[in-house]
Image (cartoon, grey):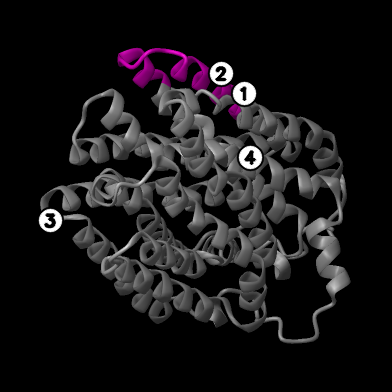
Amino acid sequence: MIDDEPGPARASGYGWAVFALSFGLLMSDHMARQVLGAVSPLLKSEWQLSDSELGALSSVVAVAVGVLSFPLSLAADRFGRVRSLFAMATLWSLATLGGAFAQSYPQLLGARVLVGVGEAAYGSVGIAVVLAVFPQHMRATLSSSFLAGSVIGQVVGVSLGGAIAAAHGWRVAFEVIGLSGLVLALAYPLVVRESRLGTRPQREKLVWGDLGRALFGSRLILLCYFASGIQLYATGTLAFWLPGLFKRYYAMDVATAGKTTGLFLLVCAAGMIASGIIADRLARRAPEVKPRVAMAYSLASALLFAGCFFSPPGPVQLALLAAALLPVAGVAGICSAMVANLTPRRFHGTAMAMLALANNLLGLAPGPYFTGWIADRSDLLTALKLLPLPCLLALAAMALARRDYALAMARPEK
């Protein structure tokens, strides 16, 4: 079953306005996540937390996102995506503000769970909204560019959060990030209108068989979910643990570690956007090449991560880290475009929710926690040496998907 409504023939000014606001909210989403990484050294010292406890504060957000992304995205498809996005952004912003008033680890953990509940379906529903107002041939570019908002949000979250925390304390960092998200949430429904998205809420009786076949009906779809999720193990791990790496092995203070992490995450964001553009251009005449492009990204990131973390701390390690971050997140954008091309437009929000489920439960949730768990038993640098493995697993999945995707793209659209 492939996409039966490929979208408008060309991009429009309204489409770019929708993209800009959706991109901004995705930044806010990940600012709320990543501010924790920036202030984690202060939390560790103030509350005497272990690395695994710190990692759990990040992982619990991704677990909530993974578990709830499917039901909340299904509800958004049926009852209105814009209204749902407004409610989600309001909740994660208020929960971030609530974290500023936590007096204990359990209270902060509870606030982080609520952040995850609010963020649960934003990535999947937000990208479905963006794809609805752009032509099909731009999907890898738009998917990668939209997902780059998550990385840029991490950049702002870790840089701004680290600077504010160093000057005013970690609670003020939470307050600033929460309030900025609330402002964007209030602006979103004033500009983005459901009636102009080219889709309607699916309030008629849902045929579960059709939905099941669209989301799970082929090995190809499942391979896309797996490849995207397992590759993001590396990005989720680094987004959280880079400040700790720089503090422990490069003797940086909290503010400097946050700013340095921000620079490296900007490299990742630039690489994600460039990866999507390259994939779309290569696939313009031959759509079946997308899995092969993803394979190249996975292989490059695996080799560069191996060189990076098996090198001692120093300029060579930092150069290899920057090089590895260029291709590492490109697989997620390609897999998003592949899933969109393989599913009907009316199910795009729910299909992206399944992709978000895989991204969070396979990558973003276990990455920070298991890295911290291994670091507690050895050291952080040893834990990071495992990052080439998920990239190689993504490579294997895309290798298995290559032939099936070529056959699917060769079929006439329904």
Query: Tag 3, which secondary structure?
Result: helix
Q: Are marks 1 and 3 in contact (CB under 8 Å)?
A: no
Query: Tag 1, which secondary structure?
Result: helix
Crowd rating for badge 4 (residues with CA inside 10 Å; few <14, some 14–19, many 20+): many
Question: Residue 299 got which mark?
Answer: 1
Q: Are marks 3 and 4 in contact (CB under 8 Å)?
A: no
| Magenta-span inclusion, residue 316 | yes
- For the residues carrying marks 3 and 2, which lies nearer the camera in this image? 3
Mark 2 to mark 1 CA distance (whole Å) = 6 Å
The disc labelled 2 sits on which kind of residue? Answer: Leu
Q: Quadrant of the N terminus?
A: bottom right
Which percent across, then down, holds residue 324? 47, 25
The disc labelled 1 sits on which kind of residue? Answer: Leu
The numbered mark, 3 or 4, whose residue comes first in the sequence reads 3
The residue that mark 4 highlights is 230
Mark 3 to mark 2 CA distance (whole Å) = 40 Å
Q: Which residues are the magenta region?
A: 297-320
Mark 1 to mark 3 CA distance (whole Å) = 43 Å
The residue that mark 2 highlights is 303
- Between 14 and 84, the residue placed more toward the observer is 84
The numbered mark, 3 or 2, whose residue comes first in the sequence reads 3
The numbered mark, 4 or 1, whose residue comes first in the sequence reads 4
Question: Residue 168 got which mark?
Answer: 3
Asked whether the viewer can see residue 139, the reply is no
Q: Is residue 344 above or below residue 307?
A: below
The numbered mark, 1 or 3, whose residue comes first in the sequence reads 3
* Residue at figure coordinates x 48%, y 70% from the top left: 118
Query: Tag 4, which secondary structure?
Result: helix
The numbered mark, 2 or 4, whose residue comes first in the sequence reads 4
Query: Tag 2, which secondary structure?
Result: helix
Left or right: 75 with respect to 88? Answer: right
- For the residues carrying marks 1 and 3, which lies nearer the camera in this image? 3
